Image (cartoon, grey):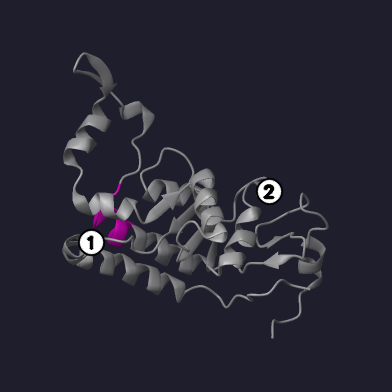
Amino acid sequence: MAPPRSKRQRREEPHSLLDNESLACVASYNGPIHTPVVDNVTKEIFLDRLDKEICKRFSLTVSVPRAKRQMVMTDGKMVLAEKKRRKREMNPSTSLVKSRIKLGTNECTRVLEAAVGGTGPKPLLIILAKNIHPPNILAHIPHLSMKVGTPVMLLPGKASEEMGKTLGVAKRVAIIVFLPRPSLNDDDAAAQEADHARIDSFIDFIKTKIPNQDTKLAT
C-alpha cells in the first residue's frame, strides 16, 4: 500500500492534462501518475556507472561541442571533420550500444509509442531528468511507460545538464531509454554476447536503485 500523500503532494497534483507542475506527478485521463524522485546519491551512482560502463567502455560520444567542429573537404564536399573521424573510428561495440540506447524527447517518444502499439520492443528502463520546464514537454512519458510496464528513474537537481555532459552532448539530455537486445542471427549473437551482457548488467543494477513504483494510477 502506498503511503498517504502530504498536503504539499496533494497541492501539486495537476487538475488537467496541461496543469503539470512536476514530472513527479503528472495528469492522465484516469488520475495523476506519481513517479518517485531518487536521491542525489543514487543520481551520482547512475551518472558514474553510465560514464564508466557505457560511455568509456563502448567509446560512446553522442556529439562534439560546436566550438570544436571543423570542416574538411571529402570527395569534393565539405563535411565535419569530427563526423569523418568518428565514422572511421566507429567500432562494432559502439554501434551495438547505440542500438540499445535512445536519447531525446522525440526519439524516445517514438520508441514508447511503438511499444504501446505492439510494433516495437518494450524498453527495459527509462531515465528522466526532473529539471525540465515546462514539465508538459515530457509529461506523456510516465503515462506511456506505465502502459508498457517500464520502470522510470526520475533524477533530481540539474540532471539534464549532467547527463548531457556525461554523454558528450553540447546541450541537455532530458530522457534516456534503454532497449532490449535486438534479434540477431546466431553468429552475430555469439560475437556480441559479452557486450550485450555488460549492458544488461548495467540496466539490471540501475533498476535495483529505483524506489518501488505503483503500477496503478493514483486515485
Highlighted range, magenta: 51-60
Which residue is painted at 68% across and 48% down in the image?
136
Mark 1 and mark 2: span between their CA atoms?
41 Å
- Whether residue 174 is visible, yes or no, is no
The disc placed on residue 41 is none
Is residue 213 toward the left or the right of residue 183 in the image?
right
Q: Give the labeled residue for mark 2.
A: 136
- Nearer the observer, 187 or 4: 187
- Disc 1 or disc 2, which is closer to the eye? 1
Q: Is residue 188 magenta?
A: no
Q: Residue furthest top?
A: 76
Q: Tag 2: Cα neighbours inside 10 Å, few (<14), some, or many (≥20)?
A: some
- With respect to residue 17, does 77 lie above or below? above
Q: Is residue 57 magenta?
A: yes
Residue 141 rendering spot, x and y as whole percentages: 60, 56
Corner quadrant of residue 20? bottom right
Corner quadrant of residue 187? bottom left
